[in-house]
Each structure stands twice: as C-alpha cells, then as structure tokens.
Image (spheres, grey):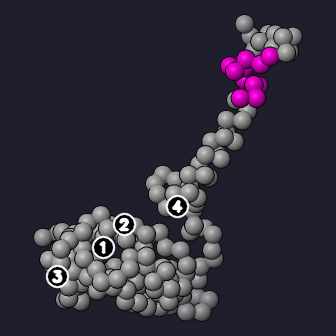
Amino acid sequence: MSTSESEGRARQTGRWSPASPASPARASLPALIGVVYLSVAFGRGEIYPVSPMGMFSEVHDSAGRLVVRTGRGELREVADFRAWRCDGSLDFRAAYPACFPDGYSAGAVIAGDHIVSHPGAGEGERVALVRQIFRIAGQSGPVVIEECPLLSCTAVDGRR
C-alpha cells in the first residue's frame, strides 16, 4: 500500500495509523524529545550529555581556568593529582565570586568534580588551587593574566 493510499484510508476511517508519516504522534515526537532534554538539563545542571549551556547565557570580557600551583611554584592541571583534601568550599563560584568575573565556568565545575571524586586523607604535597584570569587590555592590547588564589589543599601527584 502506498503512502497516499494509507493517508486516503486514514481519512476515510477517521483514524490515523501511528506508522503514517503524517500522524500526530510522529509530528509531536521532536517536541517531546526537546521538552525531555530541557527538563533534564535544567533539573540536573551540568552533567553529560545534557546541559543548560550556561556558557552561552552571559557575555564575557575575560576567561579563566583552574590550575594547581605546587610548592615548587609550577602550574599544573587539576587532573594531574589525586587523593585531594582541601580547606574550604568546592563551590568555587559562590565561595570566591571575585575570582569569577566572567561568571559561568565549566572548567571550575569539572575541577571540583575531579577533586570530589578523588578524595584523600591529607597525604601528599601542599598545593594551592588558583584561578588564572585572562583579559585583553583595551580593544587590541596584550593579554593580561591575573592569578586568584582559591584553596589550600594536599594532593598526591598522579604522574609519579
């Protein structure tokens, strides 16, 4: 049976077949998927694979990232360490608003998740969590890098 025959038969009987390409069920499926996605995204927040995409909700004139400053003064990635123990809140944006002039930071959320999922009892070296903030001076000036200290922690170097 061709598509036009099935549509004609549906019109004659007054019922739509769910398999019919023009059925209301098929037409509303994309809208239903969109509503479910948005409900999960705003209900759960930043969690893969759904997200309210907060990075696009604000205009930014700076950018930043969370890094670790070791006792030797080196800058390293948060993911390079494990067995974390920190003295303070891991809700960085709420606890240290001056360090987040650009607002939303997916990197801070990811770093906080890494620290929470790799806890320790205080073993390891003393490190400082810092946020580097990058700004462009003027319209086409040089990049200015500021460093904003967040927390003092202990962590084990996972690369050794």
* Residue 57 percent across, percent down from the top left: 63, 69
**Residue matched to label 2:** 113
Predominant SS along the magenta part: loop
Distance, label 4 to label 1, CA atoms, is 22 Å
Distance, label 3 to label 2, CA atoms, is 20 Å
Q: Residues within 10 Å of mark 2 (few under 14, many from 20)?
A: few
The magenta stretch is 15-25
Distance, label 1 to label 3, CA atoms, is 14 Å
| Labels 1 and 2: the sequence-earlier one | 1
Q: Secondary structure at mark 3?
A: strand
Q: Secondary structure at mark 2?
A: helix
Q: Residue at x 43, y 69 (%)?
A: 109
Q: Is residue 4 left or right of residue 70?
A: right
**Residue matched to label 1:** 78
Mark 1 or mark 3: which is in front?
A: 3
Distance, label 2 to label 4, CA atoms, is 13 Å
* Residue 135 percent across, percent down from the top left: 52, 87
Q: Residues within 10 Å of mark 4 (few under 14, many from 20)?
A: some
Quadrant position of the N terminus in the picture: top right
Which amino acid type is shown beneath numbered disc 4? Gly
Instruction: Examine the rendering and report whether any part of residue 156 can be seen.
Output: yes
Q: Secondary structure at mark 1?
A: helix
| Labels 2 and 4: the sequence-earlier one | 4
| Labels 3 and 2: the sequence-earlier one | 2
Mark 4 or mark 1: which is in front?
A: 4
Instruction: Examine the rendering and report whether any part of residue 4 can be seen.
Output: no
Q: Residue at x 49, y 61 (%)?
A: 46
**Residue matched to label 4:** 45
